[in-house]
């Protein structure tokens, strides 16, 4: 805020005595109270426009002037960084909260609104975040379920291996029975066939007549 007399702005850094003298000197005169939205350092229209461009308006907007997707993602990330340990929600709810923060397109208010608790229409869509103990229990439960699945899979593999081993054992047993059957067959053939003794076998060579070779005589 700053006072303005007839033509000139009044120095706002006066001492208490100087203010007293100024009040006395302006008795009966019209004095304006100038209120600057963004502080006394911005007193001219070009300065105000430059400040709005640098600090107020969103860095990225679409053709309609609304905040661009990149700005929405940035605000969502900031909301999650600050509030994820307090609330949990689906992605669409975080975007709704971000759009609510960015509704005025005044970037200077975003940081403040991000730190404030959500409005009722957003809070109704949020759920309390899991406590550390609950997260640990949930992680332990997931680990136990995974370990149980691994053990069950190993049991099933062992069953299949046993079934395969049993099938191989049955094949070996069948092969052994087949060989025993052939053995008994050969033994039966041998038992039913009487071979002569060596003394009864006559060597035919001495009784053969040697025929003279006349074809090769000269």
Image (tube, rainbow, N blue to C red):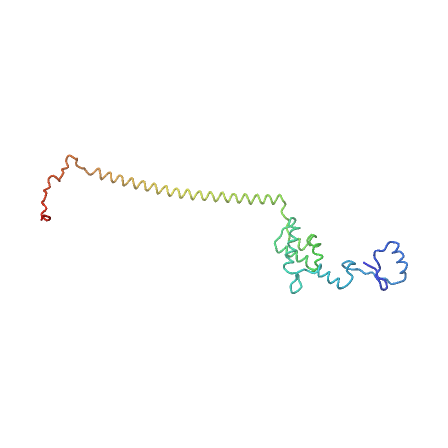
**Residue 215 spot, x, y in % from top left:** 10, 49
The single residue placed furthest to the bottom in the displayed view is 63
Query: Quarter of the image holding residue 120?
Result: bottom right
Relative vertical location of residue 201 with respect to residue 119 in this rendering, above or below: above
**Residue 74 spot, x, y in % from top left:** 65, 56
User: In the visual, does 73 lie left or right of 36?
Assistant: left
Q: Nearer the viewer, residue 53 or 29?
A: 53
**Total of numbered circles in the picture?**
0
Query: Quarter of the image holding residue 31?
Result: bottom right
The single residue placed furthest to the top in the displayed view is 199
**Residue 53 spot, x, y in % from top left:** 71, 61
Q: Nearer the viewer, residue 118 or 4?
A: 4
User: In the visual, does 204 lie left or right of 18?
Assistant: left
The single residue placed furthest to the front in the displayed view is 218
**Residue 1 spot, x, y in % from top left:** 81, 58
User: In the visual, does 16 lie left or right of 206?
Assistant: right
User: In the visual, does 161 lie left or right of 190?
Assistant: right
């Amino acid at each position: 805020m700053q006072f303005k007399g007839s033509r000139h702005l009044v120095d706002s850094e006066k001492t208490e005595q100087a203010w007293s003298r100024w009040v006395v000197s302006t008795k009966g005169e019209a004095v304006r109270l100038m209120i600057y939205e963004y502080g006394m350092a911005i007193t001219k229209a070009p300065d105000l426009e430059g400040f709005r461009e640098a600090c107020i308006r969103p860095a990225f907007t679409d053709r309609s002037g609304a905040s661009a997707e990149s700005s929405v993602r940035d605000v969502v990330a900031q909301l999650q960084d600050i509030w994820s340990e307090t609330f949990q929600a689906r992605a669409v709810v975080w975007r709704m909260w971000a759009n609510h923060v960015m509704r005025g397109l005044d970037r200077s208010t975003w940081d403040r609104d991000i730190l404030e608790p959500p409005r009722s229409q957003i809070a109704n869509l949020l759920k309390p975040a899991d406590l550390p103990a609950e997260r640990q229990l949930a992680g332990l439960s997931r680990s136990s379920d995974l370990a149980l699945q691994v053990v069950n899979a190993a049991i099933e593999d062992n069953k299949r291996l046993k079934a395969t081993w049993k099938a191989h054992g049955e094949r070996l047993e069948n092969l052994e029975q087949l060989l025993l059957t052939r053995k008994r067959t050969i033994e039966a053939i041998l038992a039913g066939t009487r071979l002569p003794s060596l003394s009864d076998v006559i060597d035919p060579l001495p009784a053969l007549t040697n025929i003279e070779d006349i074809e090769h005589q000269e």
